[in-house]
Every structure is written in structure tokens, then in C-alpha cells.
């Protein structure tokens, strides 16, 4: 891992397009400003991990019980739509 | 052709969806197909056609959560984007949850898709299905 020292107002460039600026430093933490192309997603790491875990947990085949649950769920939703 | 839960599904090239970045934490999910479950509407399979073939149960969240579209429309300026949410099935259907925080958007014109994350905290990763 590359570790750099930066003061308030100083920046780091990643690749050609991503710029990270140290906006403020306090006892609470560091505030960062991030400029990146719109198609580049930026997440707090904890949120990223949470979504990753949620995606992985859902990416499975269904066992018999789960298939039966899906059938009940489908019936429940269709009965409400009527 | 792909096989899910011992069922075989056929698809043609025109149905292939492209996720340039994959899904979050699943970068291998780049090319996928959406297969409506005829017996279990309104649910569909979103299935990768790549090697290890992860697949998800998905649903249009608007079919279940009536006020959801207003939130999704804040994220995309293309009004006819299709919205899907990943469903985590539990063996007790009442414990099944829907990921409303990180919906999947698909453009019907280009078949391009992406998973985005809603920045406000209104919806969670595991929202229960309304029982009433």
C-alpha cells in the first residue's frame, strides 16, 4: 500500500481522472472531496462490503424449502395486486 | 442455454444484458439474462451466462413497494429504465427480504445494466415484504 502525507487543501490524483482532496482535518476525522467520472462508483468501504455480502448471500440456487417459500410469496403478492 | 434449479432455459443473443462493471462484489457478473418465472410471477431470475454462473431471484420493486419509483427516478434521468431489486429468499417466505438500497437498472434500448446505491438511508439492504 502506498502511504502519503497530505495537508488540508492538498490533493492526490489516481489514474488520469480521479482526484481526492483533503478538505478538512479535525479530531473527528478527515473530510475528503472526491472528483471522479460519473461512471466510476464511489462508496464508503463499509457500505461497499455490506452490498457485496448481500449480493453474495443472494446468489444461490434455491433448495426445496426455498422454492416452496417463493411459491407462497408469489401467491401472496398476486393476491394483493388483484 | 442455462440451467437453474434443474430447469433449462433457452435465450438468444438479443436477450443478453451487459453489466460493464459486474455487480458489486461480483465483478464476474458481466453478461446475464433475465428470465421471468412463469409460475412464480412477478419474480424473475437474473442469471450470469459467464463461467461460474451466479444467479439471483429479482423483482421489480414497484410491484411490491408502492412508493419506490420516486426514489429510483432521482438516480437516473432516463425515465424508461427498468428497475430490479435482488431478493434474498428465506425458507419462511415472511422472512424473505428485498435489497432496495442497491437496485439494478437496465436500459431496454441498449441492454446495458448497472447496480447503483441509493445515498439516502430511506431504504435498506434487507427490506421485508409487506404482509398486509
Image: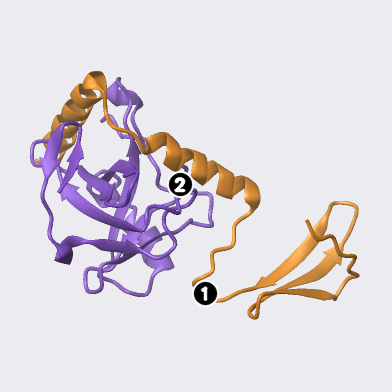
Chain colours: A orange, B purple
User: Label 1: which residue?
Assistant: A38
Along the horizontal axis of the image, is B86 left or right of A40?
A: left
- In the picture, the disc for residue A74 is none
Q: CA distance from mark 1 to mark 2?
A: 23 Å
Q: Residue at x 24, y 19 (%)?
A: A65
Q: Residue at x 33, y 25 (%)?
A: B90
Q: Secondary structure at mark 1?
A: loop
Q: Chain of mark 1?
A: A
* Image location (x, y in percent) of residue B98: 36, 40
Q: Is residue B115 above or below residue A81?
A: below
Q: Secondary structure at mark 2?
A: loop
Of the pair B110 and B99, the residue shown nearer to us: B110
* Image location (x, y in percent) of residue B22: 41, 57
Q: Is residue B91 above or below residue B53?
A: above
Q: Nearer the viewer, mark 1 or mark 2?
A: 1
Q: Chain of mark 2?
A: B
- Circle 1 crowding by C-alpha within 10 Å: few under 14, some 14–19, many from 20: few
Please tell me in which quadrant of the rendered image residue B115 appears. bottom left
- Circle 2 crowding by C-alpha within 10 Å: few under 14, some 14–19, many from 20: some
User: Label 2: which residue?
Assistant: B123
Please tell me in which quadrant of the rendered image residue B21 appears. bottom left
Q: Residue at x 12, y 60 (%)?
A: B12
Amino acid at each position: 500500500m502506498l502511504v502519503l502525507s497530505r495537508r488540508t487543501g492538498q490533493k492526490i490524483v489516481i489514474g488520469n481522472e480521479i482526484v481526492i482532496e483533503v478538505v478538512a482535518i479535525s479530531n473527528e476525522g478527515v473530510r475528503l472531496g472526491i472528483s471522479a467520472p460519473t461512471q466510476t462508483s464511489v462508496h464508503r468501504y463499509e457500505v461497499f462490503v455490506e452490498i457485496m455480502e448481500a449480493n453474495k448471500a443472494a446468489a444461490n440456487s434455491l433448495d426445496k424449502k426455498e422454492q416452496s417459500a417463493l411459491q407462497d410469496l408469489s401467491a401472496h403478492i398476486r393476491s394483493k395486486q388483484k | 442455454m442455462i440451467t437453474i434449479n434443474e430447469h433449462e432455459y433457452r435465450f438468444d443473443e438479443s436477450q443478453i444484458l451487459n453489466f460493464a462493471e459486474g455487480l458489486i462484489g461480483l465483478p464476474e457478473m458481466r453478461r446475464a439474462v433475465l428470465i421471468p418465472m412463469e409460475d412464480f410471477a412477478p419474480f424473475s431470475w437474473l442469471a450470469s451466462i459467464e463461467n461460474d454462473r451466479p444467479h439471483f431471484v429479482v423483482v421489480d420493486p414497484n410491484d411490491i413497494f408502492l412508493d419506490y419509483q420516486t426514489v429510483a427516478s432521482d438516480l437516473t434521468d432516463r425515465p424508461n429504465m427498468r428497475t430490479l431489486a435482488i431478493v434474498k429468499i428465506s425458507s419462511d417466505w415472511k422472512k424473505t427480504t428485498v435489497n432496495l438500497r442497491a437496485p439494478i437498472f437496465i436500459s431496454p434500448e441498449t441492454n446495458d445494466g448497472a447496480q447503483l446505491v441509493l445515498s439516502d438511508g430511506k431504504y435498506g439492504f434487507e427490506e421485508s415484504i409487506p404482509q398486509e
